[in-house]
Structures are given as structure tokens and as C-alpha cells.
Image (spheres, rainbow, N blue to C red):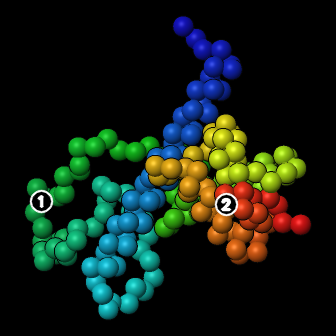
Amino acid sequence: MFLSEAETEARLDDLRRQRAALDRAIAEHELYLDLGRRLARPGVADPVPAPVAEPARAAPPHPDPVPPASRPVAAAPVPPAAPPRAEPAAEPRPVGGGAARREGRRLIEAAEEILAAAGRPMHAAEIWERLAARGLTLPGHDPVAALNTRLWKRAQGGSVFHRLGDGVYGLAP
């Protein structure tokens, strides 16, 4: 009935990967919502970005004309039917796309480690296979194309990556 230590660790790794994928998906949807709100208000300067709120606690799109003090108790907002998402207390959720940025940096650092360990240039598909073996994920239908784009952009920016051909990258000399 009980899992062995190795089985438990494997299950924990799987759950962590799922949590990371969900965090990325949530950050992506929040980014799209924010972009949609900005595009819906052309000409309005965007002051400081608002902190990211949980979907259940998000403010209504139009302000309520009734002040909270005069609102009857029965008019309190009803929480959505979706179950609340549990977050670890040790890791506060960053504002904006911080989690996505952190995940992107981790992905690029792992790609750099893979190229350094291989000691030779590699195609993005090869790099992706090794990243996936480490449990890393990329959003979208074609993770190889997404990785290729990320590496291509960084190779142009003068980072540690050097583009050698179509989808082939090595470490800069």
C-alpha cells in the first residue's frame, strides 16, 4: 500500500512539473487578460501595473455604484464554483510574469548546461529532448520551435549562445 522512497520522489517530481506547467499557463492567461485590458483602453496611459489577483478575488470590470458600507450583507460576491488553487506558503506569487520569467531563465540555463556538457553544437530538437528529459516544459504546440525562437533571440543579443545554422546552436567562443 505504501510507496517506496523512489516512487514517492518520482511522483513528487511529476507533481512539481504539473504545478510548473499550471503556473506558466496561469501567468500566460493573466498576461493575455492584461494585454486585452490595455488594448480595450487605447490612449489611457498605463501607470503602475496592478498586482496580479486570484481569479476569485478579481475586481469587477465596472466599478460598483453602491458604496461597500451601504451594501446589504446578502449582496456579497459569490465565489466561483471552481475549487481554490492551493499555493505553497513558502513561495509568494510574484507580480506579473515573474514566475514565467524565472521558468524561462531556468530553461535557458539548462540549455546552456546541455551545450556545455555536449561540447559541440546541437540542433534545437536535440537540446529540447534533453530539456524534456530533465522535466522542463514549454508552452505551445511545437516546443522545438518555441525553444529555437528563444535561443535565436538570445544569440542575436550577444549572450552565450551562437547560432551556427538553421536551428543549430553552440556556445559563443
Q: Nearer the viewer, mark 2 or mark 1?
A: 2
Q: 32 or 145, which is in the foreground?
A: 145
Q: CA distance from mark 2 to mark 1?
A: 60 Å
Residue 144 spot, x, y in % from top left: 58, 50
Q: Secondary structure at mark 1?
A: helix
**For the N terminus, which image quadrant?**
top right
So how many labels did they put on this image? Answer: 2
Query: Is residue 106 shown to the viewer in this render?
Result: no
Q: Quickly name the residue at label 2.
A: 166
- Relative to 4, is 55 above or below? below
Q: Quickly name the residue at label 1.
A: 75
> Could you tell me if the residues under marks 2 and 1 are in contact, i.e. CB atoms within 8 Å?
no
Q: 167 or 84, which is in the foreground?
A: 167
Crowding around mark 1 (Cα neighbors within 10 Å: few <14, some 14 to 19, many 20+) is: few
Residue 134 spot, x, y in % from top left: 68, 39
Tell me the residue at 51%/50% (across/down): 142
- Say what amino acid the circle numbered 2 marks: Asp
Tell me the residue at 17%/58% (across/down): 76
